[in-house]
Structure formats: structure tokens, C-alpha cells
Image (cartoon, rainbow, N blue to C red):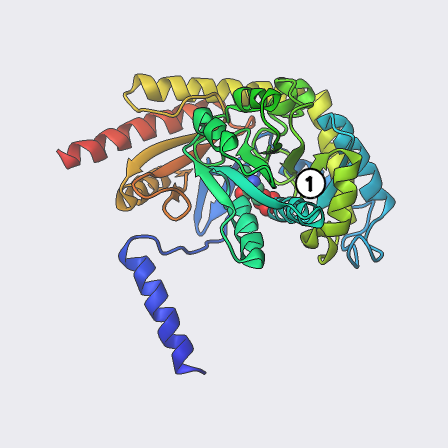
């Protein structure tokens, strides 16, 4: 065993421990759609992204009917008619010409950014990414990767939702560079919406590609739960839509949606697609079930959005400041890592699982409890959560005085 490796590990991990950022996993075993077992305890889960309670639904309907592993990448023999049908159905739902499934949302973002860079390079053009400061780590990692290939920074970050800044950056753009504006429809950690309408409006004046990550809006907003881009009727303006199957659809996987030509480009240039084994056919098949459930059971998204409005208004009435919006991602900010962790510990003692989110996942000074809701939470579970959060927040605040 290398001493050097031991030294490197202990230095890095001790650094994390000293600032309350050391991460550890625990086994969280589902009991039903909202209850989990953690060690000896049964807890109500308020930290899953399974907003529509679908993860538990598939066991009976899908497992018996299709294969598990794809066996190879899509360009070898891992693209089955299950994938083809799911991609067609997904595109129809999202209102795009086409779509392509990837094994994760992370990979979907990687493949999309790799593709935009490659097609721009093929035309002898540079590329510049104009990125909301709060976009998901997978988008940041994707852009950093292509920057590493090129050996220079190609990113301008704008303050969250600052459309005036986006406009200034577009105004100053080098005409030899392709401009790509990157944002999300519902932000994963703040739970608020991207200012998609105003960004889309800039398209009438400036030439840019618009990439929107709909990971947390898919299944919840718009006609049949197709997403916020569909709700706002912005299809014409959004060139690249990313979705995940892993949040409201309760599965695992991601997809890039857009024009047929974009999807052909991903197949040719998206290394995260080309060099990775396809999404298991099981999940491709379940994607169609998920879309059907979204179409046929609108009460799921209505209920989770109504619970979200209730929790938001009760917490605000109790004196807690929240970010704007109505999504089921409701962060309660504590600023200090240690306080967010203490609040989570106290909630767990009361039977509620809410995880603290700390830097580097969120900016320094914005540690938080990230509460997420499911349509399967009962009214009494939600009441219990609201009462516990209000009590704990006021207890922790009075301790600082
Ligand atoms: C906004 C956003 N994009 C992409 C991803 C990655 O998706 P997946 O978990 O399917 O890899 C996530 C998940 O955490 C996310 O929140």
C-alpha cells in the first residue's frame, strides 16, 4: 500500500472534516413511496426527487417484460426497439422533433456540451458558454472538460437569472464564436425557475444557441407534465433540452431532446453517448410507462405542486425566508454548515429525513436543508414537517442571539 496515497487521502479528507463538509453514505431502504428505513429507524423521506411517487410503481409493470443490460453502446448493438420507441415517445411528449436516451442525466449534459463544441469546431468556429452561476455540476463539468481539450477558458458566468448581463455578454460576443446560453428551468438546489421567457426573447436580437436543463421541471409542469419549456410555449426558442428520467419519472437515465439533426450530431460527436453502454432496455421501456402515467394521472403533479404551495406559505408565515417559486424543492437556508447539519439531525430525531446540502454543492454561506416533496406525502406527514422545521429553525436562531 502506498504511503503517498495514504498521505494524500488523509490530507484531503481531514480538510473536508475540518470545515464540516465530509460526506458519507448511509443505506436508505425504501419501505413505500415516502417511508424509508435508515438503520433501526423508520423515517418519512423529504429528500428524494421522486416527486410523483413513481419509483415504487414499476416493479410489477416492467420487470417481467424486457431485458436488463443493453450489452453494448448504441452504435454497436445496444440500441433496441425499446430505445427507439421510448425516444420517439419522449420527443412527442416534450414537443421536439427527436430525442436520445443516455444512461444518466449527467451523461446527457456531457454529451450535449461535447456535441456543441465538436460541431462548432468542425466549422472552424470557437465556442463560448454563457452560464447561469447556479447550473448543475454536470453542466459545469461538461464545459470544463471541453475547455481542457481546447486549453483555454470558454465560459462566462452570469449572476443567477441576470438577463441584463446575458444581453451584455451577447452584445460583446466575438462573431467568430458560437454563443451558447446555458440555464435550467427549475434550479436543482434553489428550486426557483430560470427566467426562460426573457432569455428566449433575446433570440430576436442575438444569434445564440439556448440549452435548458429541465431535470426538475419534467413531469411537474406544462401540458401532460412535459416541462416548463412546454408550459411557456418556448419550443421554438430552446435548441437543446436536457431531461432526466431520474427525478419525477422515478427511473434512472437522461435524454437530449431537440431537432433530428441535433440528435444525429449527438450520435456522431457526443462521446458520453458513443463510448458508454446504452441505457438498459428496462429503463427505456419504463420511460414510456412513466410518460403514460404523467398523461393519465395529472392529479399527481397537481397534488405535489399544491403541497409545495402550502409548505412554502406556512414556512414563510412562520418567518422563514424562501426563494421565489412553487416547485417541490424548498431550501431552508442556514448559512453555516454546522447549523444545517444540526437541523437535519434534529429532524431525523423526529422521524423526518431531510438532508443538509453544503458547499461545494452550493455556494459558500448558503448551506441549507433541501426539503423535497412527493405527491404521496400525506397531509399529516407534511404538517409534521412544517411544525418541526419551524420549531427547529427558531431554536437554532435563538441560540445565535
Ligand atoms: C439540474 C440537473 N441536471 C442533471 C442532473 C444529473 O442527472 P442524473 O442524476 O440523472 O445523472 C441533475 C441531478 O442531480 C440535476 O439536478
User: Which residue reaches farthest front?
Assistant: 175
Residue 368 seen: yes
Rendered residue at 71%/27% (across/down): 94
Rendered residue at 31%/41% (across/down): 340
Image check: 371 left or right of 144? left
**Which quadrant of the figure contains the C terminus?**
top left
Rendered residue at 57%/19% (across/down): 201
What residue is disc 1 on?
Answer: 255
Q: Position of residue 231 (x, y in %)?
A: 63, 18
Element carrying mark 1: strand
Q: Position of residue 356 (x, y in %)?
A: 37, 42
Closer to the camera in the image, 130 or 352: 130
Image check: 268 left or right of 330? right
Q: Is residue 63 above or below residue 302?
A: below
**Which quadrant of the figure contains the N terminus?**
bottom left
Q: Position of residue 291 (x, y in %)?
A: 73, 30
Residue 29 seen: no
Q: Position of residue 199 (x, y in %)?
A: 54, 24
Image check: 67 left or right of 20? right
Q: Is residue 138 above or below residue 166?
A: below
Q: Is residue 360 above or below residue 241?
A: below
Query: Where ligand 1 lies, by image quadrant?
Result: top right
Amino acid at each position: 500500500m502506498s504511503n503517498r496515497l495514504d498521505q494524500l487521502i488523509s490530507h484531503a479528507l481531514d480538510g473536508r472534516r475540518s470545515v464540516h463538509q465530509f460526506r458519507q453514505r448511509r443505506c436508505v431502504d425504501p419501505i413505500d413511496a415516502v417511508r424509508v428505513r435508515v438503520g433501526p429507524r423508520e423515517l418519512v423521506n423529504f429528500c428524494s426527487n421522486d416527486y410523483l411517487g413513481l419509483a415504487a410503481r414499476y416493479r410489477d409493470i416492467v420487470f417481467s417484460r424486457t431485458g436488463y443490460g443493453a450489452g453494448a453502446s448504441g452504435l454497436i448493438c445496444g440500441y433496441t426497439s425499446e430505445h427507439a420507441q421510448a425516444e420517439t415517445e419522449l420527443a412527442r411528449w416534450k414537443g421536439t422533433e427527436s430525442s436520445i436516451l443516455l444512461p444518466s442525466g449527467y451523461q446527457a449534459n456531457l454529451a450535449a456540451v461535447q456535441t456543441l463544441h465538436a460541431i462548432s469546431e468542425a466549422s472552424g468556429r470557437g465556442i463560448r458558454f454563457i452560464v447561469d452561476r447556479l447550473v448543475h455540476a454536470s453542466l459545469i463539468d461538461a464545459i470544463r472538460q471541453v475547455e481542457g481539450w481546447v486549453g483555454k477558458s470558454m465560459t462566462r458566468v452570469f449572476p443567477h437569472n441576470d438577463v441584463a448581463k446575458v444581453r451584455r455578454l451577447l452584445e460583446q460576443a466575438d462573431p467568430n464564436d458560437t454563443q451558447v446560453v446555458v440555464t435550467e428551468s427549475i434550479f436543482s438546489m434553489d428550486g426557483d425557475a430560470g427566467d426562460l421567457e426573457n432569455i428566449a426573447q433575446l433570440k430576436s436580437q442575438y444569434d445564440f444557441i439556448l440549452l435548458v436543463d429541465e431535470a426538475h421541471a419534467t413531469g411537474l409542469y406544462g401540458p401532460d407534465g412535459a416541462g416548463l419549456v412546454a408550459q411557456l410555449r418556448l419550443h421554438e426558442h430552446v435548441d437543446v433540452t436536457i431531461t432526466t428520467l431520474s427525478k419525477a419519472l422515478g427511473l434512472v437515465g437522461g435524454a437530449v431532446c431537440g431537432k433530428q439533426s441535433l440528435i444525429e450530431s449527438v450520435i456522431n460527436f457526443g462521446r458520453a453517448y458513443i463510448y458508454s453502454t446504452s441505457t438498459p432496455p428496462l429503463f427505456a421501456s419504463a420511460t414510456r410507462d412513466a410518460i403514460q402515467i404523467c398523461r393519465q394521472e395529472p392529479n399527481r403533479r397537481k397534488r405535489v405542486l399544491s403541497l409545495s404551495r402550502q409548505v412554502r406559505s406556512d414556512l414563510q408565515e412562520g418567518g422563514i425566508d424562501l426563494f421565489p417559486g412553487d416547485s417541490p424543492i424548498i431550501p431552508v437556508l442556514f448559512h453555516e454548515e454546522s447549523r444545517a447539519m444540526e437541523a437535519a439531525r434534529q429532524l431525523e430525531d423526529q422521524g423526518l429525513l431531510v438532508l443538509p446540502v453544503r458547499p461545494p454543492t452550493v455556494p459558500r454561506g448558503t448551506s441549507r436543508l433541501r426539503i423535497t416533496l412527493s405527491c404521496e406525502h400525506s397531509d399529516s406527514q407534511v404538517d409534521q414537517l412544517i411544525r418541526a422545521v419551524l420549531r427547529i429553525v427558531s431554536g437554532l436562531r435563538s441560540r445565535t442571539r
